[in-house]
Image (cartoon, helix red, strand yellow):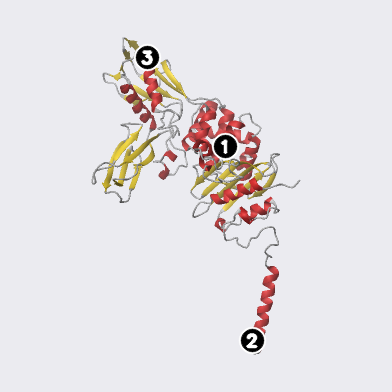
């Protein structure tokens, strides 16, 4: 009996201690009782401070074992909130913010890439006696229709036959095709396409160095499905291992290029009533891909290669004669697919182009030096960042969130800033080249049309950095980088932070 009374006394004392040190729900302006649940902005009392709101979001249990670097600044450049803001983190495609700012500052909004067609021969009648050189100067926007027009230009000059070789010249850049940290398993896909000064894009997304492979149903079970290429080219080889199956059965199609070759293996099952499958496949050595398609443009427009003519890679003689040329769209317009669609190839091409223009060498090393210089000129501490590529595919690039917001804030003073901001994805705007990678996120007021920011995602990393206006008109700059997380995407945390910023009213 005595033992029972002592036990009750001990339990009562323990309960008192627990209550004394437990937070009182409602003591703050929001509850953290459900910290293990995903925090939503509806949990906040609007009178809570900005810091309280953001800290509540960042208490999300999904961040356990991860790190979230966050920085928020006002239009005066004052940092209103930071968490691990000085910790160097991987930015993923937020790296493109630095690349595009550097390109605008270095190359200029109106900059255009050029592709030249030259010859070392002379025209005798309708026969050009000599080689034709296709000299690439980095243009990532070159399409099949542009090659057709270049062929037509030659035909209009009276060239019907060429007794010489068709040579692709990619010497404007170095011959290193892949950035130093690109994972081997990214290399066959459009996200890891090879970079060459002479390349070709399959459509106006400008995924240069890729070919579109499309698989569609054929008419009978047991047959191979139909496989088509855009643009048509003999430079890649399709290995068709597909099989048609009866209508209603499952579709299972894979499209992948074998490493180190241009053998594209297409395999799996396609039902008779199946929908098409499509994939953008990176080409091995895109210089020769561009030349192969250019040769087809010759044939389609009545220009014949005669004698022992061949297609090859080489360097244009310095005394070659210019026959015709083609210019790309201006940089300010090229930034739209680059930033809205997060086009990796464009980021790496711009990096090499800056190296070529500033240091006379089209390489990653020289290009990254330019980006580093421009970034530090925009207020970033140069000794706390590590830049490894122009797209953000690298898992070694390191930048603190507070340095991102410095750069984004200072960029607003530049004459090119309207083009920079126009290139960013806009939350909730459904048009693909307006909303970009944010078109299906934050689709309601007050974030829709308000949050203008760059997304980023690689394995274990998600990021969002850009601009938003608060409820009372305060213009804010923010950067969110979450690293080392496991499991499903954490973009909802980014969206919750951006929504808090859009809803917040600052005290007078």
Contact (Cβ within 8 Å) of mark 1 with mark 2: no
Label 2 with label 3: CB-CB less than 8 Å: no
Q: Alpha carbon of mark 1 to alpha carbon of mark 2: how far?
A: 70 Å
Q: Where is residue 383 in the image (x, y as percent from the top left)?
A: 62, 41
- Where does residue 61 sit, x and y in percent of width and height? 57, 58
Which mark is nearer the camera, 2 or 3? 3
Q: Position of residue 347 (x, y in %)?
A: 50, 35
- Which residue was labeled with disc 2? 4
User: Label 1 crowding class (10 Å Cα cut-off): few <14, some 14-19, many 20+?
Assistant: many
- Quick one: label 2 or label 3, which is nearer the N terminus? 2
| SS assignment at label 1 | helix
Say which residue appears at 37% left-offset and 36% top-offset. Answer: 212
Instruction: Tell me the residue at 32%/51% (across/down).
Output: 250
- Quarter of the figure that contains the N terminus: bottom right
Residue 42 appears anywhere in the view:
yes
Q: What residue is at 32 percent from the left and 31 percent from the top?
A: 233
Q: Which of marks 1 and 2 is nearer the N terminus?
A: 2
Pointer 1 residue:
98
Which of the numbered marks, if any, corresponds to residue 138? none
Q: Nearer the viewer, mark 1 or mark 2?
A: 2
Q: In this view, does 93 lie to the left or right of 508?
A: left
Residue 111, percent across and down? 53, 25
Q: How crowded is mark 3: few (under 14 residues within 10 Å), some or many (20 or more)?
A: few
Label placed on residue 156? 3
- Which SS class for mark 2? helix
* Residue 396 visible: no
Q: What element carries label 3?
A: helix
């Amino acid at each position: 009996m005595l033992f029972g009374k002592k036990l009750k006394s001990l339990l009562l004392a323990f309960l008192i201690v627990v209550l004394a040190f437990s937070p009182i729900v409602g003591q703050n302006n929001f509850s953290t009782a459900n910290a293990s649940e995903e925090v939503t902005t509806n949990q906040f009392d609007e009178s809570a401070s900005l810091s309280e709101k953001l800290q509540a979001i960042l208490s999300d249990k999904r961040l356990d074992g991860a790190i979230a670097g966050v920085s928020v600044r006002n239009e005066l450049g004052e940092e209103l909130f930071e968490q691990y803001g000085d910790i160097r983190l991987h930015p993923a495609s937020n790296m493109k913010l630095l690349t595009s700012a550097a390109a605008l500052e270095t190359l200029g909004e109106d900059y255009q890439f050029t592709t030249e067609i030259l010859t070392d021969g002379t025209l005798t009648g309708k026969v050009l006696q000599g080689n034709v050189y296709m000299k690439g100067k980095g243009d990532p926007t070159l399409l099949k229709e542009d090659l057709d027009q270049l062929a037509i230009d030659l035909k209009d000059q009276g060239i019907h036959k060429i007794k010489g070789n068709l040579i692709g010249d990619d010497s404007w850049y170095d011959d290193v095709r892949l950035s130093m940290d690109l994972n081997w398993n990214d290399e066959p896909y459009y996200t890891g396409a090879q970079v060459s000064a002479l390349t070709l894009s399959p459509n106006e997304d400008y995924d240069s160095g890729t070919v579109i492979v499309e698989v569609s149903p054929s008419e009978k079970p047991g047959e191979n499905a139909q496989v088509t290429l855009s643009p048509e080219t003999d430079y890649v080889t399709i290995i068709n291992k597909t099989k048609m199956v009866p209508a209603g059965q499952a579709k299972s199609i894979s499209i992948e290029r074998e490493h180190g070759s241009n053998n594209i293996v297409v395999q799996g099952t396609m039902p008779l009533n199946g929908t098409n499958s499509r994939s953008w496949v990176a080409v091995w050595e895109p210089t020769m891909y561009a030349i192969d398609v250019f040769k087809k443009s010759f044939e389609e427009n009545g220009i014949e290669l005669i004698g022992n003519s061949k297609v090859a890679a080489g360097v244009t003689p310095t005394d070659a004669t210019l026959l015709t040329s083609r210019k790309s769209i201006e940089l300010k317009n090229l930034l739209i697919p680059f930033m809205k669609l997060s086009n990796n190839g464009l980021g790496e091409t711009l990096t090499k182009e800056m190296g070529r223009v500033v240091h006379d060498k089209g390489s990653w090393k020289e290009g990254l030096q330019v980006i580093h210089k421009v970034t530090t000129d925009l207020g970033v501490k140069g000794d706390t960042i590590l830049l490894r590529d122009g797209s953000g595919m690298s898992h070694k690039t390191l930048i603190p969130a507070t340095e991102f917001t410095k750069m984004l804030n200072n960029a607003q003073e530049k004459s090119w800033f309207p083009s920079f901001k126009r290139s960013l994805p806009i939350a909730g705007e459904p048009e693909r080249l307006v909303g970009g990678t944010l078109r299906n996120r934050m689709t309601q007021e007050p974030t829709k049309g308000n949050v203008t920011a760059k997304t980023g995602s690689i394995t274990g990393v998600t990021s969002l950095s850009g601009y938003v206006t608060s409820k009372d008109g305060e213009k804010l700059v923010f950067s969110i980088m979450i690293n080392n997380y496991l499991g499903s995407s954490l973009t909802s945390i980014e969206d919750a932070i951006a929504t808090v910023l859009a809803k917040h009213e600052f005290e007078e």
